[in-house]
Amino acid sequence: MRNSFWIVLLLALLQQASAIRQSAPAVQNIIKQENAEKIGHHDVKNDIYKNTQEKLEEDTHNYTEIEALPANKTKESATSFEDDDNGRILGGTGLTSATFSQFNFYVFIQGENCASKILKECGGAILSASWVITAAHCVALATTIKVYAGEFEDPTSATPVTATAIIHPGFRRNFMINDIALLKMSTPLTLGTNIGTARCSAAIPSKAWDNAAFTTLGFGRPNDDTVDPGSALNIVEVQNMNKAKCNSETIAAYVTYPANTGCLSTNSGNEGICNADAGGPVLYTSPSRSSAEIIGISSQYVGCTRDLPSPFTYIYPFLGWIQANTKMAFT
């Protein structure tokens, strides 16, 4: 009798174990389904998305002539260098009341956080009474944007106009891809003698521009110890470098500049842009035009005093986007 009891018990246990094994796949499927449902209600792509080299290479079909970072480039060292504190236009010449009239479209921009702390100081250019163009990284993190126009000495002596940023949807800060933004003024600027507009060039970038003379400007900072911007708007003549030559020089710093950008030679580290100069216009005077036009927007720099070229974002690839937002025509 006892043996029969134990036999019956053993058979029952075996049947239970078999049932558990048979139900295990179903349970796993239920778990997978529940997880899938949770993922479906959560933006996993944004959670796991990091601007890694692999992701950048994967997206090359979205950007013409894109150049990925070197193979040994790490995510940590891939961040941009625009936060260098050594600031000023290098090798520039201060504008005067007489020469400012040619560049009265230049504006000084401050981006602030919710605590009114200045996050970034940059330049920009007036396209119309209601629109200013600048670099996306200048305003991407700002909750308040102030635009100062009409000054060539102390920029913040002007009354600021607040603005709302329209950042290019393809902008990626870690790699400075599509580093361009539009600012819509809360109140139209009053155009006049000291506040003018600039024309965007519709010229297509080509190798014909290699070694061409470009102009850029900015307030920057006059020395490494000064907190406030420089006391005068400085202009500097720079040379446009061949893109391949540019990247061959920056590769030592583990940097290659992305598509739709040009390079400004720093002339052995003595000329170029620095802190608070990003976002300013890069200008070119075509033989067929009587005045300078914006062919690019200064983007970043790799150490102000280093012998490395600085990139700027070409305007031409973004004319359609600019026109769609501003309703302006370009000829």
Image: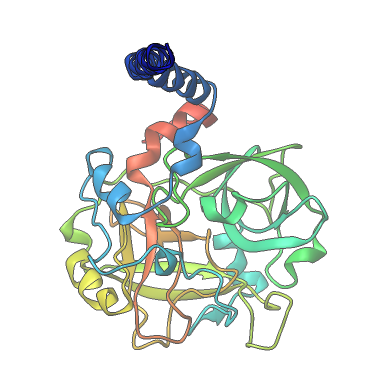
Quadrant of the rendered image containing residue 215: bottom left
How far from the left and from the top, in percent, is residue 71? 22, 65
Quadrant of the rendered image containing residue 25: top left
- The answer to whether residue 252 is above or below residue 323 is below
How far from the left and from the top, in percent, is residue 114? 79, 50
Quadrant in the picture for the N terminus = top left
Q: What is the residue that sits farthest to the front in this orientation?
A: 1
- Say whether residue 260 is left or right of residue 142: left
Q: Is residue 105 visible?
A: no
- Say whether residue 330 is left or right of residue 143: left
Q: Which sits in the foreground, 162 or 103?
A: 162
Q: Which sits in the foreground, 179 or 106?
A: 179
Q: Is residue 257 visible?
A: yes
Q: Residue at (42%, 56%) from the top-left corner?
A: 176
- The answer to whether residue 173 is above or below residue 45 is below
Q: Residue at (45%, 31%) from the top-left corner?
A: 323
Q: Residue at (35%, 17%) from the top-left corner?
A: 14
- Say whether residue 114 is left or right of residue 283: right
Tally of marks: 0
How far from the left and from the top, in percent, is residue 104? 61, 58
Q: Residue at (31%, 73%) from the top-left corner?
A: 254
How far from the left and from the top, in percent, is residue 137? 54, 54
Q: Which sits in the foreground, 68 or 217?
A: 68
Rendering colour mode: rainbow
- The answer to whether residue 196 is above or below residue 254 is above
Quadrant in the picture for the C terminus = top left
